[in-house]
Image (cartoon, helix red, strand yellow):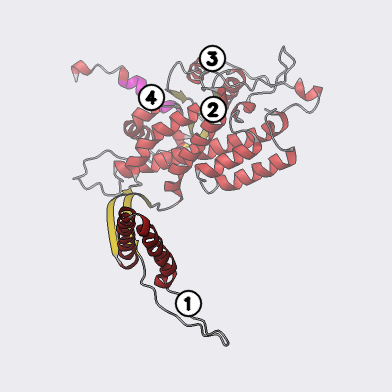
Amino acid sequence: MRKPADEKEADLKFVHYTSPYFERIRYELMRYCSGEINGLSVLISGQRGAGKTTLTKLVIQKVMQESKALIPLPLLLHGPTIIDSEAATSDPDEDSGSKRSAPLEKEKALRQLITALYRCLSTAIYDAWLIAAEEAPSARRAQRELLSLRAHLDLRLERAPDPDVLRKIWDRSGFLHGGVAFYLRPFEQLADGSERDSRVPPIAGDPEDQGLREIVALSACADAYRVILGETEEKIRQEERAEQTREVKMVVPVMAESKKEGDEQKKKSNVEKLAPAALGTVAGSLAAGATNPKIAVGLLIGAVVWLASWLAMEFGSRRTKREISRELTINVKWDVNRLERDLPVLLKRVKDAGFAPIFVLDELDKTRDANAALENFLKLTKHIVTDHAAFLFLTDRDYYEQLIAADNVDWGHI
């Protein structure tokens, strides 16, 4: 994906033998990356040492070079770790003995798939940052500062960060809108003179939201990854409170003497402060009453009303209070049901971020009773395997031959 160091390295090519089966798998994966199909399941069988793993890696590499839509995100998994030979879909009332129940095996498989999805997505974003730091025109800071943010991002991804942490890192670097994912496209000299087609394809969404979609995908996968890190407890609390208070109260004045030496003056009470104004009002009314008795009566009534109002506010008390409260608390359950429900949503958000997850379950032939194990796994996760992502199952020749033999059985004579 990186820029070649010199012309000799740019001309370096690796030639491998291909076959019609190679082209068929490549064609189906290209349809998957372009959004023509939501998922597919492919069985690759062959004898040990025949090159099944090499064939799979070459196909994915070819799709990564040719895809102009979503970027293939390969997740190479150890099949026996995910598909346990003791998985069973037996009756829960029966004594299964040493065999494990289906829900437990389903949870184990989902944990492995989510862990791989989060790890591979984090690695892809981490690698894309290095290329974006060198080539992105929207980068706000010097390259050394971008590399520092990249290292900080790597450490935070180990701890399943919250969305606000990721948003701050993307915003500081200048990748909040343009994103970094499509800088993972292979280096090539284009006709317009550019060296890489980092444009966001229409299938991914609005180019101005690419960075935000990457944050959503990372934070959603990190949220599910917390189930694997340990026992997670989450409580959602919502509280609504409305309070209205009205209080009218005036404190009765208290005379207080100054305790400082040499200070013998007393503080005036509110009544003493009011006296000059009240006397002035009364004196003015009497003076006006000498000339016009009606004016004197009006002024006296106004003075009495004003004085009564002042006394009520000064020495009276009134309080009004109204309160409305509502509280909602939810204890979120983190269990296998949530993992099974969230995985299709996670796969969709990863696709929205520009990546097409391709799960490769290798070395299934090394699992004890691989045929039964794979059959049980498909029964438990059929809706995910066929409808939401691409799954490549690598088994030995025996499994394929047993499938052919089962199809050739004449069930009408049994």
Q: Distance between the residues labelled 3 and 2?
A: 34 Å
Q: How many neighbours does mark 1 have within 10 angstroms: few (below 14), some (14-19), or many (20 or more)?
A: few
Q: What residue type is labelled 3?
A: Glu
Which quadrant of the figure contains the C terminus?
A: top left
**Alpha carbon distance from label 4 to label 1:** 86 Å
Q: Which disc, if any, is residue 23?
A: 3
Q: Earlier in the sequence, mark 3 or mark 4?
A: 3
Q: Residue placed at 42% from the left, 39% from the top?
A: 82
What amino acid type is highlighted by mark number 1?
Lys
Gap between marks 2 and 1 measured at Cα: 69 Å
Q: x%, y% of residue 371?
A: 37, 32
For image coordinates 53% across by 32% down, the residue present is: 212
Q: Nearer the viewer, residue 366 or 12?
A: 12
Residues in magenta, as a range: 396-406
Q: Which of marks 3 and 2 is nearer the N terminus?
A: 3
Q: Does the magenta stretch include residue 226?
A: no
Mark linked to residue 387: 4
Dot label at residue 209 = 2
In primary-sequence order, the first of circles 1 and 3 is 3
Residue identified by numbered label 1:
267
Q: What residue type is labelled 2?
A: Asp
Q: Kindly identify the residue that appears in the image at 25 percent across and 46 percent down.
A: 96
